[in-house]
Amino acid sequence: MAGENFDQSIIVEFIIECKEHLESIEGNLIILEKDPANLEILNTIFRAIHSVKGAASFLGLKKISQLTHKMENVLDQLRKQKISINAELTDIILEGSDILIKLVLELEHLLNTQIESSSDNDLPDFDSYSEIDIEEILSKVENIKTTNTSVQSDTQNDTGKIDPIEKPSVTDNSKNNSKDMINNALSQALSVYLSESMEIFEDFTRNLLLIEKNKKDQETLNSLFRAIHNFKGNSRYLGFANTEKLAHHMENILDDFRNGKQEVNSNIIDLLFKCIDTLQELIKNITEKQNDHSPSVDKLVEQLQKYSNVPKTKSNTKKTPKPSENVSSVDLETIEIFLSASVQHVKNITEVLDKIEKDQITVFDLDVIVRAFSGLKSSANYMGFDETQKISEQMEELVREIRKEPTRRLLNFKNLLSRCLDYLKENFDSIKQTSKESPIDPLLTADIMIEIQAILRTYNSVVVNEVNETVVEETPVKPTAGSVTDTENQAELVQTDQANSQKKNITVEKTIRVDQNKLDKLMNLIGELIINRNRFSSITKKVEVDYNLPDLSKELKAGTYMIQRISDDLQATIMSARMVPVGTVFNKFPRMVRDLAKAKQKEIILHIHGEETELDKTIIEQIGDPLVHLIRNSADHGLETPDERKKSGKTAEGNIFLRASHEGNNVVIEIEDDGRGIDPAKLKKKALEKGLISQADYTSMSDDAAINLIFAPGFSTAEQVSNISGRGVGMDVVRDNINKLNGRIQVETNLGKGSKFSLILPLTMAIVETIMVRIHSNVFAIPLQYVGETVQVKPENIKYLNKRKSINLRDKVVGIEDLADILDIKRMNIVDGNNEELISVVILNADGKRIGFIVDELLEKQEVVIKPLIDYLACIKGISGATILGDGSVILILEPNELVNLATQTE
């Protein structure tokens, strides 16, 4: 990498991933030595080394690439049972792993030194910089293959050939082995597969939406293809036949997109979306039902085949017949002819590879490779050997690109070519013994295909940069992450000081994956610490007041402040670890809005802002359904049809805005549209017809109160029920769910211009700020975020309006209720005109209303830990939970939204 421009973030990611992979090897090797038959552990070690090797090869890190390549060969021999594990072999692999870690640390040091000392992007050649000698360990690893042959000799038959190793039948489509594979709930491979699948589906959905807008975006098409190709390979590896089958046919469609054989259109995009939905269903079945059965798969495959089998270009209209189309079976003579020709092609490629090793490559040699892979492609296509055909086709395309500029960086290509040769030789051995193509390791196949595309993008970006060199000032082209360009071109393409300063500040992050249950337990412990912190405060007051020991009290206060500071820092740290960007929820809505627009024949554009805003994971998991209801209502009720919008002087496209932002200790999520708005008069009329309000209410109800009718259970203004809305359920569920999160919802609307729903949510549900109030001998906590203000009023200032108490607060009438009456508690003070004492009132803003509650005494503010109520206690209206005070007493936490509802229902 000497003198080459590089993206520091890619090196950072490489270092982080390498550390994770290498740190896992030591423990797994010890397990493998004790349990040599544990194929799962062996595959885990192999994948770790394989991943490091692939990334190192791409980045041109020769030492790391060479060592991992040798170690990978040994591990592959172990997997095929050609050698056996023993103490000596374990020691050598552990030594290799230690040296790899040293190399990675050396690379990290070089990167950090470069960042601190220079503002440019030229990283010195790592292999020249490195002082670690790997020749000795390379020799040790190489000798393993020649000295440890105990198993190999046992596997030879009488003809001297090695028998194929019988593997678990995980890809037999005639049997459903999914259940057998899932039974081991602790299987690391399966766990990774399930988690990665959901990430793949999210990225796939997002890229599908992008490609529908920009049908010529080759990079997005490649991303779609790689994602589903990788998913297919993983599914095959784990034996999920239906999942693999559907992914395979999706891959065919995407491959046609990439090669220009099929045009991107909405019908195919719709079909691919249905396929993704079905794949998600299959993953859910694997998780819950232990199989990947679904009646939708065959129907979708049939629809996909209709598109993939239709000729689109002249080159595609004349199809070369395969043996399966013109003969009943492949005879051995045909197999022998294929293998004979293939061996010669491989031999030709190997000879060129030797020249590359000696830096003696010529254009003629590259032509030899092109002809070899072209021949392999044609032969494999005729024989029906799809894996060989695909890899040969991709390699042919890559070599043709390299031939345009043969002097450029051949290191990555050399390593890739060597891997392809090893793969093809192994594949041909399998064909010779079984007369059919049975890929040895689908994950390896997928990885080779991805690496081919990565290097191909590098060469394509070089060509683009050189072609546009004379017009770069008019049409700047920003290279994709991971592309390699000359220093001069890079300087012309990326000139902003901001970008340079951002890269200069990149450092290697220290990360570790933590199970969520551990974070939940830590949060509970923090809660207990806060409870005991409050207890110390209570003891300090008692020592000073009750026991009159001011000196001791002073020392206790100092210790209490220290505990408070530490607990606050711990709380903030654990809270930040639990925070998740709301983008994880927002990302699913572009697809939903697209489907709604098509269903309602509307043109809708979804604008997302603030997706990086973070919320507690517990809250993130529960806001999905409320957001779905609100966005569906905006699309169905809020936005007009294109014709209606044009008549109103609006654009045909309706807009929905989904925003998230921080406001103090809360996160505000807004769902706004520029549609028809909400008509208060229409709401009141509909509520009267449904019997939800009386005639008196209809006459006196304000517009704000009318708008809040949308949250009444069973209320709907839709003239007819659709599959989207109109059943009178949804908005009441939204309000209830938000209330359960200790949040609130606000509505703003402008008739003819649109509506906005604002969800005000706490950052966390576990710990909240409250104000303590006393009623007789009972103390209650009220969440501070609902408290508008607290006031003290004279008894004579309490007036009656429509038989309800009220006060005049800054020329505005505010209704008040006695909290003791709401909670059915006997009061200490009777509120009447003869009482001369000031009355304490807490004004609450909740459920879209502003109501005051009379209490006996206002106490201090206090941070409390919410403990949920269970059994019949959870059904008590007006109570959301409980907490423990510093003196050990248990008090109840009030639920403001329910209190307001109870107050407005009181006669």
Image (cartoon, helix red, strand yellow):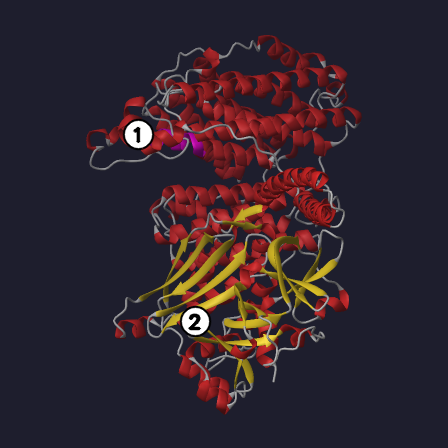
Name the residue tied to disc 2.
810
Residue that carries the numbered disc 1 in the rendered image: 463
Q: Quadrant of the C terminus?
A: bottom right
799 to the left or right of 397:
right
Q: Position of residue 307 (x, y in %)?
A: 44, 55
Residue 177, visible in the rendered structure: no
The image quarter in which residue 2 lies: top left
**Secondary structure that dominates the magenta span:** helix
| Amino acid type of the residue that numbered disc 1 sits on in the rendered structure | Val
Q: Closer to us: mark 2 or mark 1?
A: 2
Q: Looking at the image, how many numbered discs can be counted on the residues?
A: 2
Label 2 to label 1, Cα distance in Å? 73 Å
Task: Mark 2 or mark 1: name the one nearer the start of the chain.
Answer: 1
**Magenta stretch in the rendered image:** 453-461
Judged from this view, the residue extending furthest toward the bottom is: 695
Q: Residue at x 55, y 21 (%)?
A: 104
Q: Which quarter of the rendered picture does the N terminus lie within? A: top left
Dot 2: what SS? Answer: loop
